[in-house]
Image (cartoon, rainbow, N blue to C red):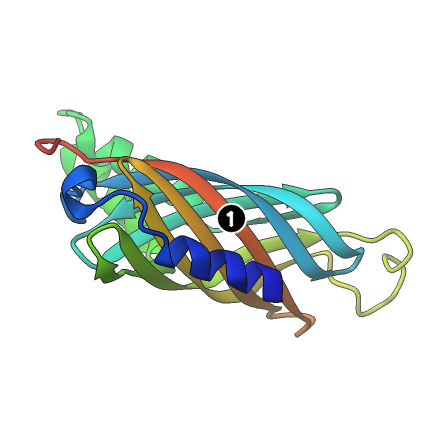
Amino acid sequence: MKSYALIVLLIAGSPGLTAQEVQMPGHHAGQCILSASPTFLLNTPNGVQVAGGIKFQLFLGKRFSIDADMVFGRDYLHMSPAVIGVPIGLAGLSSGNEDAPIKTFLFSAAALVLSLEHLSYHITVTPDLDISPYVSLLRFKYAYNRKKAMEPDFESEQLSFAGGVQINKYYGRFVFSPYAEYNIGYSDHISGFNVGIYLGIYFPGKGQR
Protein backbone atom coordinates (compact mmCIF):
# COMPACT_ATOMS: atom_id res chain seq x y z
CA MET A 1 0.00 0.00 0.00
CA LYS A 2 2.92 2.35 0.69
CA SER A 3 4.27 1.87 -2.84
CA TYR A 4 0.78 2.44 -4.26
CA ALA A 5 0.44 5.71 -2.33
CA LEU A 6 3.90 6.79 -3.55
CA ILE A 7 2.88 6.21 -7.18
CA VAL A 8 -0.23 8.32 -6.69
CA LEU A 9 1.76 11.19 -5.17
CA LEU A 10 4.36 11.07 -7.94
CA ILE A 11 1.70 11.17 -10.65
CA ALA A 12 -0.22 13.97 -8.95
CA GLY A 13 2.92 16.01 -8.44
CA SER A 14 4.59 15.33 -11.77
CA PRO A 15 4.86 18.33 -14.09
CA GLY A 16 3.38 16.41 -17.06
CA LEU A 17 1.82 18.77 -19.56
CA THR A 18 1.18 22.38 -18.76
CA ALA A 19 -2.34 23.75 -18.58
CA GLN A 20 -1.81 25.42 -21.97
CA GLU A 21 -0.63 22.16 -23.55
CA VAL A 22 -3.48 20.12 -22.08
CA GLN A 23 -6.20 22.66 -22.93
CA MET A 24 -8.80 20.90 -20.81
CA PRO A 25 -12.30 22.15 -21.69
CA GLY A 26 -13.54 21.57 -18.13
CA HIS A 27 -16.19 19.04 -17.18
CA HIS A 28 -19.65 19.66 -18.58
CA ALA A 29 -22.90 17.81 -19.18
CA GLY A 30 -22.50 15.19 -21.90
CA GLN A 31 -18.75 14.68 -21.48
CA CYS A 32 -17.81 11.04 -20.88
CA ILE A 33 -14.75 8.98 -19.98
CA LEU A 34 -14.18 5.32 -20.91
CA SER A 35 -11.49 3.46 -18.94
CA ALA A 36 -10.06 0.00 -18.30
CA SER A 37 -8.16 -1.13 -15.21
CA PRO A 38 -6.13 -3.87 -13.60
CA THR A 39 -7.63 -4.31 -10.12
CA PHE A 40 -6.52 -5.99 -6.89
CA LEU A 41 -9.33 -7.42 -4.74
CA LEU A 42 -7.96 -7.60 -1.21
CA ASN A 43 -10.68 -9.53 0.63
CA THR A 44 -12.83 -12.04 -1.28
CA PRO A 45 -13.91 -15.61 -0.43
CA ASN A 46 -10.86 -16.69 -2.45
CA GLY A 47 -8.45 -14.32 -0.72
CA VAL A 48 -6.48 -11.70 -2.68
CA GLN A 49 -7.35 -11.75 -6.38
CA VAL A 50 -6.27 -9.96 -9.53
CA ALA A 51 -9.15 -8.83 -11.74
CA GLY A 52 -9.92 -6.58 -14.68
CA GLY A 53 -12.33 -3.66 -14.76
CA ILE A 54 -14.04 -1.24 -17.10
CA LYS A 55 -15.70 2.07 -16.22
CA PHE A 56 -17.85 4.54 -18.12
CA GLN A 57 -18.41 7.99 -16.63
CA LEU A 58 -21.13 10.31 -17.92
CA PHE A 59 -20.95 13.89 -16.64
CA LEU A 60 -24.17 15.60 -15.56
CA GLY A 61 -22.40 18.93 -15.13
CA LYS A 62 -19.16 20.44 -13.89
CA ARG A 63 -19.00 18.44 -10.64
CA PHE A 64 -21.12 15.30 -10.86
CA SER A 65 -20.88 12.17 -13.00
CA ILE A 66 -22.81 8.90 -13.19
CA ASP A 67 -20.37 5.97 -13.14
CA ALA A 68 -21.07 2.58 -14.71
CA ASP A 69 -18.40 0.10 -13.64
CA MET A 70 -17.81 -3.63 -13.90
CA VAL A 71 -14.97 -5.69 -12.40
CA PHE A 72 -14.52 -9.38 -13.17
CA GLY A 73 -12.08 -12.09 -12.13
CA ARG A 74 -12.02 -15.79 -11.27
CA ASP A 75 -15.34 -16.60 -9.56
CA TYR A 76 -15.88 -12.89 -9.00
CA LEU A 77 -17.98 -10.14 -10.56
CA HIS A 78 -19.33 -6.82 -9.41
CA MET A 79 -21.28 -4.23 -11.36
CA SER A 80 -23.56 -1.25 -10.78
CA PRO A 81 -27.09 -0.79 -12.20
CA ALA A 82 -25.65 2.06 -14.25
CA VAL A 83 -24.01 -0.53 -16.54
CA ILE A 84 -27.51 -1.21 -17.86
CA GLY A 85 -29.25 2.05 -16.96
CA VAL A 86 -26.90 4.51 -18.69
CA PRO A 87 -26.97 2.95 -22.22
CA ILE A 88 -30.73 2.33 -22.02
CA GLY A 89 -31.36 5.88 -20.82
CA LEU A 90 -29.13 7.49 -23.43
CA ALA A 91 -30.53 5.39 -26.26
CA GLY A 92 -34.10 6.18 -25.28
CA LEU A 93 -33.62 9.89 -24.78
CA SER A 94 -31.73 10.30 -28.06
CA SER A 95 -34.17 8.25 -30.17
CA GLY A 96 -36.95 9.91 -32.10
CA ASN A 97 -39.66 7.37 -31.37
CA GLU A 98 -42.82 9.19 -32.44
CA ASP A 99 -45.16 6.26 -31.68
CA ALA A 100 -44.78 6.42 -27.91
CA PRO A 101 -42.62 9.46 -27.05
CA ILE A 102 -43.90 9.89 -23.48
CA LYS A 103 -43.55 6.21 -22.62
CA THR A 104 -40.05 6.09 -24.11
CA PHE A 105 -39.01 9.24 -22.28
CA LEU A 106 -40.32 8.02 -18.91
CA PHE A 107 -38.65 4.63 -19.28
CA SER A 108 -35.33 6.21 -20.29
CA ALA A 109 -35.51 8.77 -17.49
CA ALA A 110 -36.23 6.00 -14.96
CA ALA A 111 -33.18 4.07 -16.19
CA LEU A 112 -30.96 7.14 -15.68
CA VAL A 113 -32.44 7.83 -12.24
CA LEU A 114 -31.62 4.25 -11.21
CA SER A 115 -28.08 4.88 -12.41
CA LEU A 116 -27.71 7.78 -9.96
CA GLU A 117 -27.01 5.22 -7.23
CA HIS A 118 -23.37 5.28 -8.43
CA LEU A 119 -22.33 8.93 -8.33
CA SER A 120 -18.98 10.76 -8.30
CA TYR A 121 -18.19 14.31 -7.19
CA HIS A 122 -15.22 15.91 -8.97
CA ILE A 123 -12.95 18.35 -7.12
CA THR A 124 -10.61 20.31 -9.39
CA VAL A 125 -7.06 20.61 -8.02
CA THR A 126 -5.26 21.90 -11.14
CA PRO A 127 -6.38 22.24 -14.79
CA ASP A 128 -5.14 18.70 -15.45
CA LEU A 129 -5.89 17.01 -12.11
CA ASP A 130 -9.05 16.33 -10.14
CA ILE A 131 -10.06 14.11 -7.23
CA SER A 132 -13.40 12.30 -7.33
CA PRO A 133 -14.86 10.61 -4.25
CA TYR A 134 -17.74 8.32 -5.18
CA VAL A 135 -20.44 6.14 -3.67
CA SER A 136 -22.42 3.15 -4.96
CA LEU A 137 -25.51 2.09 -3.01
CA LEU A 138 -26.81 -0.87 -5.05
CA ARG A 139 -23.77 -2.64 -6.44
CA PHE A 140 -24.38 -6.26 -7.42
CA LYS A 141 -21.57 -8.56 -6.25
CA TYR A 142 -20.96 -12.22 -7.09
CA ALA A 143 -18.10 -13.89 -5.18
CA TYR A 144 -18.01 -17.69 -5.15
CA ASN A 145 -15.94 -20.26 -3.28
CA ARG A 146 -16.66 -23.98 -3.70
CA LYS A 147 -15.42 -24.88 -0.20
CA LYS A 148 -17.66 -22.28 1.44
CA ALA A 149 -20.68 -22.88 -0.79
CA MET A 150 -22.13 -25.45 1.63
CA GLU A 151 -21.99 -23.13 4.61
CA PRO A 152 -25.52 -21.97 5.56
CA ASP A 153 -24.54 -18.31 5.95
CA PHE A 154 -22.45 -18.07 2.76
CA GLU A 155 -23.76 -15.52 0.24
CA SER A 156 -22.32 -15.74 -3.26
CA GLU A 157 -24.73 -13.16 -4.75
CA GLN A 158 -25.86 -9.99 -3.02
CA LEU A 159 -26.21 -6.24 -3.23
CA SER A 160 -23.49 -4.22 -1.55
CA PHE A 161 -22.35 -0.72 -0.66
CA ALA A 162 -19.12 0.74 -2.03
CA GLY A 163 -17.36 4.04 -1.47
CA GLY A 164 -13.97 5.20 -2.66
CA VAL A 165 -11.84 7.91 -4.15
CA GLN A 166 -10.25 8.24 -7.58
CA ILE A 167 -7.46 10.60 -8.65
CA ASN A 168 -7.72 11.67 -12.30
CA LYS A 169 -4.60 12.95 -14.02
CA TYR A 170 -5.18 14.20 -17.58
CA TYR A 171 -2.60 13.99 -20.38
CA GLY A 172 -4.42 15.59 -23.28
CA ARG A 173 -7.47 13.34 -23.72
CA PHE A 174 -5.86 10.41 -21.92
CA VAL A 175 -6.68 9.89 -18.25
CA PHE A 176 -4.56 8.09 -15.62
CA SER A 177 -6.70 7.30 -12.58
CA PRO A 178 -5.48 5.38 -9.51
CA TYR A 179 -8.29 4.52 -7.12
CA ALA A 180 -9.04 2.77 -3.84
CA GLU A 181 -12.40 1.75 -2.42
CA TYR A 182 -14.14 0.07 0.50
CA ASN A 183 -17.13 -2.23 0.04
CA ILE A 184 -19.43 -4.24 2.31
CA GLY A 185 -22.19 -6.73 1.50
CA TYR A 186 -25.71 -6.02 2.71
CA SER A 187 -26.33 -9.72 3.42
CA ASP A 188 -23.06 -11.08 4.85
CA HIS A 189 -21.70 -7.75 6.21
CA ILE A 190 -18.18 -8.73 5.13
CA SER A 191 -15.89 -5.81 4.28
CA GLY A 192 -13.53 -5.73 1.33
CA PHE A 193 -11.01 -3.37 -0.24
CA ASN A 194 -10.18 -2.87 -3.91
CA VAL A 195 -7.34 -0.88 -5.49
CA GLY A 196 -6.47 -0.34 -9.13
CA ILE A 197 -5.45 2.08 -11.86
CA TYR A 198 -7.85 3.09 -14.61
CA LEU A 199 -6.36 4.05 -17.98
CA GLY A 200 -8.87 5.84 -20.14
CA ILE A 201 -9.79 8.42 -22.72
CA TYR A 202 -12.36 11.22 -22.43
CA PHE A 203 -14.79 12.34 -25.07
CA PRO A 204 -15.67 16.07 -24.94
CA GLY A 205 -19.28 15.62 -25.98
CA LYS A 206 -21.49 17.31 -28.54
CA GLY A 207 -20.55 20.87 -29.37
CA GLN A 208 -17.17 20.66 -27.60
CA ARG A 209 -13.64 20.10 -28.89
User: Residue at coordinates 14% horizontally, 42% vertically from top-left?
Assistant: 20
Say which quadrant the N terminus sits in: bottom right
Q: Is residue 116 above or below residue 82?
A: below
Q: In the image, 94: left or right of 191?
A: left
Q: Residues within 10 Å of mark 1 (few under 14, many from 20)?
A: many
User: Residue at coordinates 75% horizontally, 45% vertically from top-left?
Assistant: 75
Q: Examine the image and state in which quarter residue 120 appears.
A: bottom left
Residue 28 seen in the current view: no
Dot 1 falls on a residue whose secondary structure is strand
Residue 84 seen in the current view: yes
Q: In the image, 89: left or right of 186?
A: left
Q: Is residue 88 above or below residue 145?
A: above
User: Residue at coordinates 44% horizontally, 61% vertically from top-left?
Assistant: 9
Give residue 155's position: percent from left, percent from top. Answer: 74, 62
Q: Residue furthest front?
A: 15
Give residue 55's position: percent from left, percent from top. Answer: 44, 43
Q: Which residue is mark 1?
A: 197
Q: Nearer the viewer, residue 128 or 147?
A: 128
Give residue 198's position: percent from left, percent from top. Answer: 47, 45
Q: Residue furthest left?
A: 207
Amino acid under label 1? Ile
